Image (cartoon, rainbow, N blue to C red):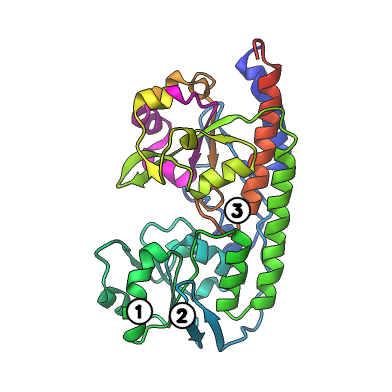
Amino acid sequence: MSERRLRAPLILVLASALVACAPSSKPPEAASTTGARATPDALPDGWLRIAGTDIPRVARSQQDLPVTVRSDDDVEVTITDTSRTIVGNDDIVMVMDALGLSDQVFAAPTNAVTGTGRAAQHHFLFNRTTGVEGILSLDGTLFVGNSLRRHGKLAQPLRDAGQTLVIVDELQPIPDKVRKLATVFGHADEGEQLAAQVQQQLDEAARIAGTHTRKPRVIHISATGGGGSPTVGGADTAAAGLIRLAGGINVGDEAKVANYSQLSNEGIVAVEPEVILVSEDDLRVFGGEAGLWKAYPSLKQTPAGFANRVWVMPDTQLKVSSIGGGAGAVALAQALSTLAAELDAAPGA
């Protein structure tokens, strides 16, 4: 059976169940979470775009402020004003989008992938050298961090200088994160609603994964994960969790890759991926198809490379653990389920 015949059923499934190249009919702030700006709609022949369509959101309503919450660094914080929010990453932006608070994203990291984050009034580079003065100079009313590791050291100095600051750590289940962030913005009830929708999607993805006839082997590659060098996603990345939930094997787990780390050409061939998974923004940074193969020439010598099986997902559903994760998990689970059946039906399977 030819590779073209193998791909045909999968393309039909994706056309009916997933977002491909069709424009979104959602309002502007909803469309901003899809990452559609990252790459052109047209993909190379044989490549597929995988994206969920149902990103949970609620209508904007009155915020219940002030509110007192417990930050994940175990400090009680009272929040009175979120109108100029400095966000630590896109996972926070996406929850704000879902609550209808896109206009309150005042400052975002320079590498933001959401439309709202890119459109923020100010941008900052958050790294090991970022100081208290740099954050204070933005004059935000609230700083919301997403990492105890990255933002924890600056938390107390910023608070001592008068900056209201909350951390909602990224290393927790998405529904819990959504609840906490919604509460920070005075929308506890709406947060429960959004979290329930995400949980339903995650459960549906797990149900679909349970029907797979096999677990396809997936390699997630990134152009930006290792100090600007091409990397492979390891066990502790959001993408790896998504792949496992959707019923795939993240080959970075087997290769003992931590976070986003480099893997040798020999190592890439050895893990035998059947699918290459890349985010839209990473594909842009690679420089498109030619740049991807140039960065990873040995991928051509893998089952995925021989089949030209490259799947492209929005960053906000693949690499960002937030409100879009459930929709992305369902989309990926559907694609992997169809692929698993096709691989089993192939001669010599």
* Residue 198 visible, this orientation: yes
Q: Secondary structure at mark 1?
A: helix
Name the residue located 51 percent from the left edge and 61 percent from the top edge. Answer: 91
* Residue 21 visible, this orientation: no
Magenta span dominant secondary structure: helix
> Where 285 falls versus 135 (above or below)?
above
- Spatial CA distance of label 3 from label 2 is 28 Å
Determine which residue is flagged by label 1.
Answer: 156
Segment tinted magenta in the rendering = 270-297
Work out whether mark 2 precedes mark 1 in sequence or the reverse, and give the earlier one.
Answer: 2
Viewer-closest of 38 and 144: 144
Name the front one of labels 3 and 2. 2
Determine which residue is flagged by label 2.
Answer: 75
- Spatial CA distance of label 2 from label 1 is 9 Å
Callouts 2 and 1 close, C-beta under 8 Å: yes
Name the front one of labels 1 and 3. 1
Determine which residue is flagged by label 3.
Answer: 325
Three-letter residue code for mark 1:
Gln
> Which quadrant of the view contains residue 217?
top right
Q: Secondary structure at mark 3?
A: helix
